[in-house]
Amino acid sequence: MRVREYQEADWAAVWAIVHDVVRAAETFPFDPDMSEELARSIWVEVPPGRTVVAVDGDRILGTAKMGPNRGGPGAHISTASFMVAAGERGRGVGAALCRDALAWAEAQGYAGMQFNAVAESNRSAVQLYERHGFQVLGTVPRSFEHPALGRVGLHLMYREF
């Protein structure tokens, strides 16, 4: 498996992953009925941001997007989002994407990386981020409507470089 830059020809496979993750409504605070057009405008970053895919040969296993968390005086802090295809979870794809995003952000001169809304029920993601040096700075209680668990908190997570 390797992580490489997103190419326009990747969109169909990336959209399949994004669509499945968003429709499940278990991890991302996006509208489950999000259109493909809106998803593309959100997921495919333009500079200074970046979008990547994790691949095994020609098969896309997951995708990530990264860039500044805010503009202006907050532009020195990066952010990233990760999605892994359902059949590929638990195989290190998310970890590879996270390592890539962290390396990229540090190389770009960002002072840290912030995740604005990590569902506390997404334990595998929270643990992955903690293994990569992130801390939960706070949790907004009952701010994410999980389809099976009801309202759960959203963590703000941060790692300083």
Image (cartoon, helix red, strand yellow):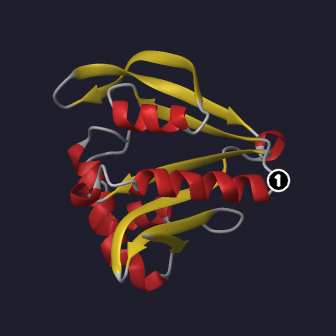
Residue in the image at 22% along x and 21% along y: 150
Where is residue 9 drawn, in percent x and y?
Answer: 41, 85
The image quadrant where one finds the C terminus is: top right
Q: Where is residue 68? Give x, y as percent.
A: 69, 50
Q: Is residue 74 shown left or right of residue 68?
A: right
Above or below, 45 against 69 in this view is: below
Horizontal relation, residue 101 to residue 48: left or right: left
Seen from the viewer's position, the closer of residues 72 and 67 is 67
Residue 90 x, y percent position in the rendering? 30, 49
101 and 131: which one is in front? Answer: 131
Which residue is pictured at 37% across the width and 42% down the height? 28
Few, some or many C-alpha atoms within 10 Å of disc 1 (few <14, some 14-19, many ≥20)? few
Tell me where residue 59 sits by quadrant. Answer: bottom left
| Residue occupying the point 50% across, 57% down | 97
- When the figure is inspected, residue 50 is found, relative to residue 138, above or below; the finding is below
Residue 53 vertical position relative to residue 137 in the rendered view, above or below:
below
Q: Is residue 33 visible?
A: no
Which is more toward the observer, 40 or 27? 27
Q: What residue do we see at 61% from left, 65% from top? A: 50
Residue 25 seen: yes
Is 23 rendered above or below residue 43? above
Residue at far left of view: 148
Per the image, the residue denoted by label 1 is: 109
